[in-house]
Every structure is written in structure tokens, then in C-alpha cells.
Image: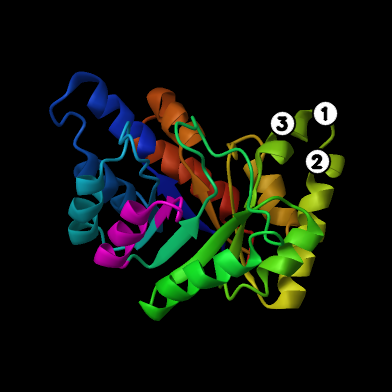
Amino acid sequence: MVRLSVNINKIATLRNSRGGNNPNLVQVALDCERFGAQGITVHPRPDERHIRYNDVFDLKKAITTEFNIEGNCQEQKFIDLVLANKPAQVTLVPDVLGQITSNHGWDTISNQAYLKDMIAIFKNAGIRVSIFVDPIPKMVEAAATTGTDRVELYTEAYAHHYHQGKELAIAPYIQAAEVAQSAGLGLNAGHDLDLHNLKYFAENVPGLQEVSIGHALISDALYYGLENTIQMYLRQLATTGQ
């Protein structure tokens, strides 16, 4: 079964919009675990517009499932945060300052030497490393030489084209996944996966181990409730994966 990691950035956004601690981010994370999520993902950014750096310390103390911290390792503050908390996994994303959401993967060819150095820092601390990549075979191939444990396929293009033709939309991801498998890389995926497109993706992408879903899941929870929504997403993954 493919594991579901719930990204709780949007819960932090809602909390920050009014100040105070409502909703309580840690309690929501614990409830996500209790409702069946197999992991919690956060993506702190320098402006702390959603996840605050202090949140990461609070969450690390509380959650019992897999903790995944995403972010840009070009920021020393992010590196220090990850090393101080030692999550199960760090996902390296090439964001730029002020970016609304992640919108591209690493160029693992031109950034080869840099990624090797960064990945070694986290792996030496006992943290599993995943790097965000586009579904381009040569980028996956180059990722395999950086020392990373996994790649996370950026799925916005799949989600965008899914309703126009799901077979064509998923084809690059199948190819990228096959390259990852051949190279011995673990495989994650995330961005714009939802209740409409998730099952088909998980059923057809070989070797998929984990999906990280935030915006769509939290939006669905407004209608269906958090517990029911998590169960709905888990059902999309129930008969898929390894």
C-alpha cells in the first residue's frame, strides 16, 4: 500500500490568519495520525507565512508517524532546523524566496555537486533524503548519482492534464518511475493529487511508496470532515503499491 503523508501547511495558514492557536496545529497533526495518515509533512518557508520554525519543534515532540520536512536547502536556517529535529525524511525542494508553492523540480545535472554535498549532510545525520524532480528520465538518472535515497515526482502536470487524457498525462511518470526503479531509488510523489486523480496515478506508477497531499485534502475536509476525508484518500490507495 502507498503511504499517505498529510501536508498540514494550510492548517497553519488558517491559524496564522487570526493569530492565536486556533486551529491547534499539533492537535490537527495528532488527529490526522489517529484518522489513519501514515505521515505528516510540513514545508516551512523563510517568511513563516504558514508553518513556523517553532512548529517543527513542537510537531517533532508530538507525532508518532513518519515526519517529513520539505524545504530549500539553500537556506542555512532550513538546514539547521532539519538537523535539530532529525525527521524520518527531508525532501529537498528548489524553491525561490517568496514562491507561493513549489512549481519545479531540481536540475539534478547542473546541481549535481551541490546536491551531493547537501544530501551527505542529512544522510550523515541519519535522515532519509528525497529530492523533488520533474518526470524527466535524465533528471531521475542524474538524481541517482547524488546519493539521495528517493525522488519525489512533481505531479502538477499530471493533475493538470488528467481530465484531458489520463493515459497521456501519466506516461512521463511511468517512464520516470521505471528509471527510478532501475537506479535503485525509492519513489514519492506530490502536488495537486486529489480524490479524482490519485487512484489512477497510484495504480499505474510502478514502485510508488508515498504521496504527500495537503491543499486538496484540506480543501476536501471543509466539506467531508477531516476524518472522513483522510479515510477517503486512504481508500484510493488501499489496493495499490507494494
Q: Amino acid at mark 2?
A: Ala
Q: CA distance from mark 3 to mark 1?
A: 8 Å
Residue placed under numbered mark 3 in the picture: 160
| 115 vs 74: above or below | below
Q: Is residue 129 above or below residue 202?
A: below
Tag 1 near tag 2, CB within 8 Å: yes
State the image coordinates of residue 84 (x, y, percent, origin top left): 25, 65
Q: In the image, 61: left or right of 104?
A: left
**Quarter of the image with the C terminus in it:** bottom right
Disc 2 to disc 3: CB gap under 8 Å: yes
Residue at 31% in and 68% down? 86
The quadrant of the rendering that contains the N terminus is bottom right
Left or right: 59 as drawn, with respect to 190: left
**Is 72 one of the magenta-colored residues?**
yes
Q: Which residue is mark 2?
A: 169
> Magenta stretch?
69-86
Spatial CA span between label 1 and label 2: 8 Å
Q: Is residue 23 visible?
A: yes
The answer to the question of whether label 3 and label 1 lie on touching residues, with beta carbons closer than 8 A, is no
Q: Position of residue 107 (x, y in %)?
A: 68, 54
Determine which residue is flagged by label 1. Answer: 164
Q: Residue at x 26, y 41 (%)?
A: 52
Of residues 237 and 132, which is closer to you in this image? 132
- Disc 1 crowd, CA 10 A, few/some/many (<14, 14-19, 20+): few
Residue at the (30%, 36%) spot, across then down? 48
Q: Is residue 83 magenta?
A: yes
